[in-house]
């Protein structure tokens, strides 16, 4: 039998999905499972989004669409990023794709030759490693501990850029899996380092930019130093902000050459974002913003609930997230202990034991390059949250 391409030996299915599958199987077997595992927003967009999609169906052109994205969609995105303070971009600076994941994959294809280096902080979104592996790039991980609030320091960034001279630096703010958000000053300090390395592309994967709590605001390196504009690529998506992960619409804004490269790639695989999804995306971006605003308030309150529960568990260290919908407690205190006679050697054992004993599904931190932690995604129905947290507390109290 002929062989698969070598790159498929490097491609791995998502570690997050593995936990979700196990939780699903237990649920199917009749267990009472509370899922804190998948990073889905768990709400639906406003009715105006569905109305726009229905309307688009009625007027289906029956044609292929634009490889870059329709003018109306690009204009809606441009207005959206202008409201984030990212001004001076035009349609030729933008490209669309089938979600931010597809945009990031395209960017890897467009910016990285085999053997080039991409650097990113850990904890990282799992897909960064997988995409680097598939395109056969080297990746350099910049570990950020709970003690430093999981945030990259300027000194760390400087040292890594000086040592590895990566072709691409990939940054994610607010963060999946930690929920941490960089302040204006922190972004400014990192931007000062970035200007020293003009040969490095900068990707800011900031798809949770609207989900920021405590009036901290969203900050991008471009706010701090506009000279980074000719090598910075901003990535965005409808998935989390608007409760539209399955609609698969993502965006980028950056240098024209990069947007053109992504348009060329699109022309050779997806061709276009489907017409109905485009109409829904425009409605989401330009219509009333009350659903995302209400959800952000709800998530902030849930964040507080999770933090209070974690604070009550002796030894668990839990930095305070200020965005997205994740909490990432360092649970190293549990490693080396036992639950019901079952020894917990690492965070994977911890998540397995928690799922089996208490029916609570979390994702092990090692999936995000941060062993010893677990990710709690708290978008479950509000009524389930206290019970899930109570079970986690009970589990830790039973460790010996
Ligand atoms: C940090 C980050 N970037 C990108 C994505 C991909 O989003 P999309 O659904 O737009 O592909 C996710 C999804 O979980 C994410 O957490």
Image: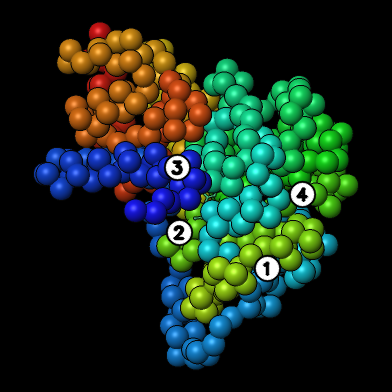
Say whether residue 186 is visible. yes
| Mark sitting earlier along the chain (1/4) | 4
Q: Position of residue 384 (x, y in %)?
A: 28, 42
The label on residue 232 is 4
User: Element at badge 3?
Assistant: helix
Q: Nearer the viewer, mark 1 or mark 4?
A: 1
- Measured Cα–Cα span from mark 3 to mark 4: 31 Å
Q: Secondary structure at mark 4?
A: strand
- Compared with residue 291, is residue 276 higher up or lower down, i.e. above or below? below
Quote the CA–CA distance across marks 1 and 4: 19 Å
> Could you tell me which secondary element the residue under label 1 belongs to?
helix
Instruction: Tell me which residue sits at (54%, 31%) in the image.
Output: 123
Of labels 3 and 4, the one closer to you:
3
Could you tell me if residue 171 is visible in this image?
no
Q: Ligand 1 closer than 8 Å to the CB at disc 1? A: no
Q: Quadrant of the C terminus?
A: top left
Which badge, 1 or 3, comes first in the chain's sequence? 3
Picture residue at 58% right of the left edge, 27% below the top: 150
| Sequence order check, earlier mark of 3 and 4 | 3
Asked if disc 3 and disc 4 are in contact, CB closer than 8 Å, the reply is no
Up/down of 320 relative to 399, above or below: below
Residue found at the far left of this picture: 30
Mark pair 2, 1: CA separation:
24 Å
State the mark number for residue 187. Answer: none
Taking depth in this image into account, of 301 and 349 the one nearest to the observer is 349
Residue at horizontal 48%, vertical 50%? 5
Pointer 2 residue: 245
Of marks 2 and 1, which one's residue comes earlier in the chain?
2
Can you identify the residue that label 3 sits on? Answer: 9
């Amino acid at each position: 039998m002929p062989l698969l391409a070598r790159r498929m030996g490097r491609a791995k299915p998502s570690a997050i999905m593995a936990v979700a599958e196990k939780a699903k199987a237990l649920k199917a077997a009749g267990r009472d499972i509370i899922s804190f595992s998948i990073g889905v927003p768990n709400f639906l967009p406003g009715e105006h989004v569905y109305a726009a999609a229905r309307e688009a169906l009625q007027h289906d052109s029956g044609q292929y669409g634009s490889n870059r994205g329709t003018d109306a969609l690009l204009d809606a995105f441009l207005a959206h990023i202008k409201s984030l303070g990212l001004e001076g971009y035009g349609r030729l600076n933008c490209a669309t794709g089938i979600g931010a994941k597809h945009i990031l994959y395209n960017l890897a294809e467009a910016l990285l030759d085999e053997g080039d280096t991409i650097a990113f902080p850990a904890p990282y979104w799992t897909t960064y490693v997988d995409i680097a592996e598939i395109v056969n790039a080297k990746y350099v991980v910049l570990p950020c501990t709970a003690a430093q609030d999981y945030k990259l320091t300027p000194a760390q960034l400087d040292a890594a850029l000086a040592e590895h001279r990566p072709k691409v630096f990939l940054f994610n703010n607010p963060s999946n899996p930690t929920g941490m958000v960089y302040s204006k000053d922190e972004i400014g300090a990192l931007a000062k380092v970035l200007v020293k390395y003009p040969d490095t592309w900068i990707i800011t994967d900031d798809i949770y930019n609207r989900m920021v709590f405590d009036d901290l605001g969203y900050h991008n390196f471009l706010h701090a130093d506009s000279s980074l504009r000719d090598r910075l690529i901003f990535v965005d998506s409808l998935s989390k902000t608007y409760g539209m992960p399955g609609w698969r619409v993502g965006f980028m804004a950056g240098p024209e050459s990069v947007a053109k490269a992504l348009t060329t790639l699109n022309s050779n695989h997806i061709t276009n974002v489907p017409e109905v999804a485009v109409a829904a995306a425009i409605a989401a971006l330009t219509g009333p913003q009350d659903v995302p605003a209400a959800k952000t308030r709800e998530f902030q309150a849930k964040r507080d609930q999770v933090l209070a529960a974690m604070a009550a568990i002796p030894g668990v260290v839990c930095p305070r997230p200020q965005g997205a919908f994740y909490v990432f407690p360092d649970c190293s205190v549990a490693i080396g202990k036992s639950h019901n006679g079952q020894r917990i050697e690492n965070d994977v054992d911890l998540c397995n034991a928690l799922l089996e004993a208490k029916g609570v599904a979390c994702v092990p931190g090692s999936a995000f390059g941060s062993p010893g932690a677990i990710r709690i995604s708290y978008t479950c129905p509000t009524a389930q949250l206290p019970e899930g947290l109570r079970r986690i507390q009970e589990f830790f109290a039973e460790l010996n």
